[in-house]
Amino acid sequence: QLQLVESGGGLVQPGGSLRLSCAASGFTLDYYAIGWFRQAPGKEREGVSCISRSGGSTKHVESVKGRFTTSRDNAKNTVFLQMNSLKPEDTAVYYCAAMRAEYCSDYVISYAYWGQGTQVTVSS
């Protein structure tokens, strides 16, 4: 079965850090660009970051620049989202998604595989 599984979410105080993981099973991530998305209650799904297939290029939405870092370890078939200096407005369900291309797309429909999501809550 081809699937992505996110982990690492949880409850953290403002200013804290979390590291999300996105692990693939049933297929190799070597051929896929990976996007991270998030969706807060009552809001549309938002693209957070993207890492190219080779790992040589990353993009982050303006609101997380300087705080979030995206990386990948193809040997472990896993992509990571390191989130530092977390703010209450970062609270959301975070999803990873894979598209078979060198670079990510801004369009959700371009992604073939999605994880089930992991909850991140930033609150004191």
Image (cartoon, grey):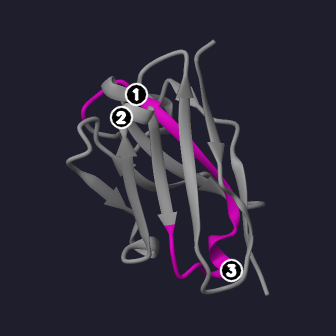
Nearer-the-camera pick, 52 or 89: 52
Q: Three-letter amino acid code at disc 3?
A: Pro
Labelled pair 1, 2 in contact (Cβ < 8 Å):
yes
Secondary structure under the numbered disc 2 in the rendered image: helix
Residue 121, image x, y percentages? 75, 69
Disc 3 designates what residue? 88
In this rendering, the label closer to the viewer, 3 or 2? 2
Q: Three-letter amino acid code at disc 2?
A: Asn
Labelled pair 3, 2 in contact (Cβ < 8 Å):
no
Disc 1 designates what residue? 29
Q: Three-letter amino acid code at disc 1?
A: Leu
In the image, which residues are magenta? 83-102
Quadrant in which residue 120 is drawn: bottom right
Q: Earlier in the sequence, mark 3 or mark 2?
A: 2
Residue 98, image x, y percentages? 46, 32
Q: Which residue shows up at 70% across the image and 50% down it?
A: 118
